[in-house]
């Protein structure tokens, strides 16, 4: 489970509040919830909220519900709800109860009648535009709707008619009667119910009216006995309304809302609405495109649940908005995979090498460690033969002195195999090098020379006769702008190089048996995972071995 390695010492202000509430006896046990709207797939920002809500419940011996905040039927779908459940489980958490705000529609309706009966809510016939006009601004108070002083009887009748489906969308609203002059605009008679003749994925056509978020959320929390209702900072201004509703209606308890800063990651987008646009306009290949910061995209990219939990732990929980570098997330997966990924060899851009002095029909089985520091991960055999592939990058015709890879007359070590020296090159009619002729030193098997001769470079390779063919996807940041959400049109900042598809890559034969849950380090080229969505054998690069952006970012920051 998630909390195995995260003890309570991973402090933050919310944990301190909870600890105080337990110490003072205010609560015997804590109850939290993670309340997504099923209108899209979860992203890395949601992971922060999930790790916090489920994490504190677990660490303090409490419980956490998964609650679908399903009050916008037109934007919500069961597909999204299913995907959300899958993602929460994948992250390593299990809810104590699966709840739906729509399960509380009757109760919410009854509470609304209670408000009307107390003279604390009224049915308004102003149009959306008029409501906006009447609301006032930050500098001017709002003014009362002519309907504000309707009698309780009239309000009850109109609200019953709303529920009975007698009116069209937009004809009436139920509003709280609070204070049109409040400095907090959220308190200027906010809407509680709207008419929406839409089919709901769970309640069908039962309801022609739907409760608003602010009204639904606090009551849902109270019904579930939530002790600490953790939400992001943009709801700070809504807290007075949260408390107002709970003070006016007789709910079983009054949860405490506590806000924390949203996760914002550089060079990407964490808004379901914008992610939706990327998906529906086909800028990416579905919600699980490995370039997206969705949990399904990260999973397909090869991120592990542990790495994401570690990331959430490292960024912490505060009240201060800030942008997190992508490198922080990448380092989490690098560290995890460095410990757990099987080492293999794969050639991304193959160059044929013929070892002239190696016997024609011979194949040797060389032994390689699956992990250099972890003998428990075992060994495997790698076939070696006369014709191999190496990376095109590992040969240069006009090589500078410090190029420690292959060039004519230079010697390198083939990982786990022999020293080879390049003696000749073959070019096509355009002058491109298409094959190297090399000589091997039979005394260097295993990678060292009995005469103590040293070579500086070690390169990876695969035996041509035994290699398997695969496609490889290399990913880069999806955006060229550090904060695409803040630009006029974030679509314009999509990185045209965010995906490089390589075909005809040559991999070690053991990868034919790769499954999608195994992670590999292709030596020298990065961490990879088998793609789950395409029939042809394809590997996705999760992350490079080192942070290739650090240098570029540093230059940009200086310039
Ligand atoms: P989005 O803007 O992506 O649609 P949202 O807040 O509308 O996000 P919800 O489904 O309502 O999405 O979010 C469920 C929970 O996840 C909420 O409590 C919300 O505050 C939290 N959450 C959403 N985005 C982030 C984020 N970037 N960082 C931390 N928590 C987040
Ligand atoms: Mg929301």
Image (cartoon, rainbow, N blue to C red):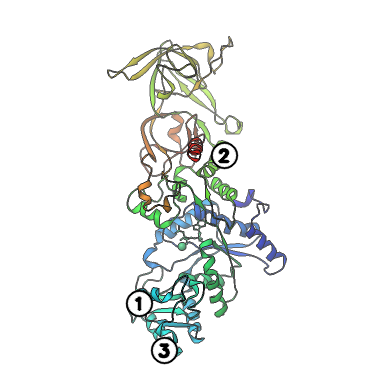
> Foreground residue, 200 or 552?
552
Above or below residue 553? Residue 10 is below
As drawn, which residue projects farthest toward the left?
Answer: 429
> Foreground residue, 284 or 513?
284
- Mark toward the viewer: 1 or 2: 1
Count neighbours of disc 1 (C-alpha within 10 A) and say few if under 14, some if 14 to 19, many if 20 or more. few
Q: Report which residue position mark 3 lands on.
A: 154
As drawn, which residue projects farthest toward the front?
Answer: 139
Q: Report which residue position mark 1 lands on.
A: 127
> Foreground residue, 129 or 218?
129
Above or below residue 145? Residue 90 is above
Where's residue 195, x and y in %?
Answer: 37, 76
Count neighbours of disc 3 (C-alpha within 10 A) and say few if under 14, some if 14 to 19, many if 20 or more. few
For marks 1 and 2, give the CA distance.
56 Å
Where's residue 549, x and y in %?
Answer: 48, 37
- The disc at residue 335 is 2
Query: Under 8 Å from ligand 2: the CB of mark 1?
Result: no
Query: Under 8 Å from ligand 1: the CB of mark 2?
Result: no
Q: Secondary structure at mark 1?
A: loop
Query: Under 8 Å from ligand 2: the CB of mark 3?
Result: no
- The disc at residue 2 is none
Mark 2 and mark 3 lie on one chain; the one further toward the N terminus is 3
State which quadrant residue 354 falls in: top left
For marks 1 and 3, give the CA distance.
19 Å
């Amino acid at each position: 489970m998630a909390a195995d390695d995260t003890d309570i010492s991973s402090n933050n202000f919310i944990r301190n509040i909870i600890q105080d509430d337990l110490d003072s006896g205010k609560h015997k046990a804590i109850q939290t919830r993670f309340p997504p709207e099923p209108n899209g797939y979860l992203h890395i920002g949601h992971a922060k909220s999930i790790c916090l809500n489920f994490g504190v419940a677990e660490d303090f011996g409490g419980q956490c519900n998964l609650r679908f905040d399903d009050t916008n039927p037109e934007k919500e779908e069961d597909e999204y709800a299913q995907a959300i459940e899958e993602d929460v489980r994948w992250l390593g958490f299990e809810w104590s109860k699966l709840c739906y705000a729509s399960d509380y529609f009757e109760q919410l309706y009854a509470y609304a009648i209670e408000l009307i009966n107390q003279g604390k809510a009224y049915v308004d016939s102003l149009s959306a535009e008029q409501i906006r006009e009447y609301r006032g601004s930050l500098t001017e108070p709002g003014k009362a709707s002519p309907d504000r002083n309707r009698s309780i009887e009239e309000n009850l009748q109109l609200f019953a008619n709303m529920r009975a489906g007698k009116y069209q969308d937009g004809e009436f609203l139920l509003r709280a009667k609070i204070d049109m002059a409040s400095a907090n605009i959220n308190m200027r008679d906010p809407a509680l119910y709207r008419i929406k003749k839409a089919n709901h994925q769970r309640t069908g056509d039962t309801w022609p009216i739907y409760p608003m978020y602010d009204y639904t959320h606090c009551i849902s929390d109270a019904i579930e006995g939530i002790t600490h209702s953790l939400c992001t900072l943009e709801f700070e201004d809504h807290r007075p309304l949260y408390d107002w509703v709970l003070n006016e209606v007789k709910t079983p308890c009054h949860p405490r809302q506590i806000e924390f800063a949203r996760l914002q990651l550089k060079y990407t987008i964490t808004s379901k609405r914008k992610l939706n646009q990327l998906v529906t306009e086909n800028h990416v290949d579905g919600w699980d495109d490995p370039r997206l910061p969705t949990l399904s995209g990260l999973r397909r990219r090869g991120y592990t649940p542990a790495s994401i939990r570690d990331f959430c732990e490292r960024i912490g929980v505060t009240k201060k908005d800030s942008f997190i570098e992508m490198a922080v997330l990448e380092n989490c997966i690098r560290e995890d995979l460095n410990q757990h990924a099987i080492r293999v060899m794969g050639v991304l851009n193959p160059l044929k090498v013929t070892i002239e002095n190696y016997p024609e029909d011979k194949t040797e089985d060389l032994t390689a460690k699956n992990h250099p520091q972890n003998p428990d991960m075992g060994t495997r055999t790698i076939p070696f033969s006369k014709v191999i592939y190496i990376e095109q990058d590992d040969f240069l015709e006009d090589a500078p002195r410090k190029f420690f890879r292959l060039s004519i007359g230079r010697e390198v070590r083939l990982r786990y195999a022999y020293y080879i020296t390049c003696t000749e090159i073959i070019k096509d009619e355009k002058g491109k090098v298409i094959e190297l002729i090399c000589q091997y030193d039979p005394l260097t098997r295993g990678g060292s020379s009995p005469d103590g001769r040293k070579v500086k470079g070690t390169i990876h390779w695969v035996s041509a006769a035994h290699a398997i063919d695969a496609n490889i996807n290399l990913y880069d940041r999806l955006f060229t702008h550090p904060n695409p959400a803040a630009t006029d049109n974030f679509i314009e900042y999509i990185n045209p190089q965010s995906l490089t598809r390589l075909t005809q890559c040559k991999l070690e034969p053991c990868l034919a048996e790769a499954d999608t849950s195994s992670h590999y380090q292709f030596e020298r080229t990065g961490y990879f995972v088998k793609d789950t969505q395409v029939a042809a054998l394809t590997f996705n690069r999760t992350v490079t071995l080192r942070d290739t952006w650090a240098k570029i970012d540093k230059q940009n920051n200086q310039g």
